[in-house]
Image (tube, rainbow, N blue to C red):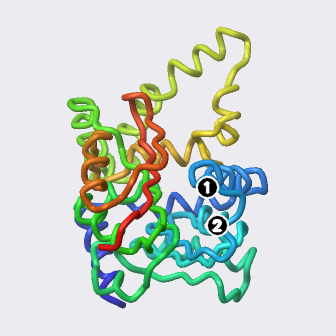
């Protein structure tokens, strides 16, 4: 067993980390062409491109592998990595399904906190890390590390949980309770969270005579990026470690490292991630 796997297993056993890979493995059974196209549209829209031909694309924290797949289908040379070995396996499964043995898609296990590992990857035209850095336990260090991998005139596309103050602190306690609960007791945490997050929407849909409409349409919504509502719910409730940041904190951090903001999509001050696309404008 390599050191990364050993570290991951130790954190899972001690209740310090959520097993994201289990959730992504279940998601793969739902993956279809519509979800893949939604992921492609998300990349094209935020990066303001039609294709990624000739670009080196790094998926830092690849999760299910969906966005690595989307980038490869758009023509990029892709390097994917994740800390969670089950997420690595999910990404490898998508490569097996769609790009078996293709040399322009490389998959590894590694950590955004491991500078030796990152130093061997090279520079990239697009460094993509959506909803990952805030789950490392050292978000600012992780952001600094991935920023160094952006090539001159390259882009950094990240999504970071919005800081809601006390609300974020409450969710951190919920997440810690979820990963610490024995299997069957996880429902005691998950069910109240489901009612809090989805209850008002489902009641509104029912009142308008369209039961489950929002739930069923979730994957096709722009902000859903081809995801699944149930898997996203579990990802949210279990997502620990958990850190947050205000938009101005991310902006100031990246501007100080000679990046320019190209695009910003906020979650309106509420629950969820703010998305940022930065461009490197000067050499370090």
Which disc is residue 71 wearing?
Answer: 2
Which disc is residue 93 wearing?
Answer: none
Instruction: Give neighbour class at mark 1: few <14, some 14-19, many 20+ (Cα, 10 Å).
Output: many
Instruction: Residue 71: give x, y in percent of width and height.
Output: 64, 66
Instruction: Residue 20: give x, y in percent of width and height.
Output: 44, 60
Pointer 1 residue: 43
Query: Which residue corresponds to the image point at 36% horizontal and 81% vertical from the top-left?
Result: 118
Q: Quadrant of the N terminus?
A: bottom left
Q: Does the CB distance between marks 1 and 2 fall below 8 Å?
A: yes
Query: Which residue corresponds to the image point at 42% horizontal and 26% vertical from the top-left?
Result: 196
Q: Is residue 238 left or right of residue 223?
A: left
Instruction: Residue 123: give x, y in percent of width and height.
Output: 44, 79
Comparing 153 with 269, the one in front is 153
Q: Quadrant of the C terminus?
A: bottom left
Mark 1 and mark 2: span between their CA atoms?
8 Å
Task: Residue at the far front: name it.
Answer: 282
First reached walking from the N terminus: tag 1 or tag 2: 1
Query: Which residue corresponds to the image point at 65% horizontal and 9% vertical from the top-left?
Result: 207
Comparing 242 with 9, the one in front is 242
Instruction: Residue 103: give x, y in percent of width and height.
Output: 66, 89
Instruction: Give neighbour class at mark 2: few <14, some 14-19, many 20+ (Cα, 10 Å).
Output: many
Q: Is residue 159 left or right of residue 284?
A: right
């Amino acid at each position: 067993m390599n050191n990364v796997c050993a570290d991951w297993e130790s954190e899972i056993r001690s209740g310090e980390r959520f097993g994201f890979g289990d959730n992504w493995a279940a998601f793969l059974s739902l993956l279809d062409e519509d979800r893949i196209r939604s992921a492609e549209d998300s990349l094209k829209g935020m990066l303001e491109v039609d294709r990624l031909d000739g670009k080196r694309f790094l998926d830092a924290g690849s999760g299910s592998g969906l966005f690595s797949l989307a980038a490869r289908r758009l023509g990029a040379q892709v390097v994917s990595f994740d800390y969670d070995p089950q997420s690595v396996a999910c990404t490898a499964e998508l490569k097996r399904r769609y790009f078996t043995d293709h040399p322009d898609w490389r998959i590894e296990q590694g950590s955004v906190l491991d500078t030796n590992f990152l130093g061997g990857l090279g520079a990239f035209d697009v460094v993509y890390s959506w909803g990952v850095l805030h789950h490392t336990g050292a978000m600012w260090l992780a952001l600094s590390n991935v920023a160094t991998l952006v090539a001159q005139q390259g882009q950094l596309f990240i999504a970071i949980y919005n800081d809601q103050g006390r609300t974020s602190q409450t969710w951190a306690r919920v997440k810690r309770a979820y990963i610490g609960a024995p299997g069957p007791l996880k429902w005691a945490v998950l069910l109240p969270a489901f009612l809090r997050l989805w209850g008002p929407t489902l009641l509104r849909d029912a009142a308008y005579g369209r039961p489950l409409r929002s739930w069923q349409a979730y994957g096709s919504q722009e902000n859903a990026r081809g995801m699944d509502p149930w898997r996203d719910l579990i990802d949210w409730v279990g997502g620990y470690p958990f850190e947050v940041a205000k938009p101005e904190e991310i902006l100031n951090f990246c501007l100080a490292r000679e990046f320019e903001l190209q695009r910003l999509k906020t979650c309106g001050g509420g629950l969820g991630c703010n998305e940022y696309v930065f461009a490197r404008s000067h050499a370090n």
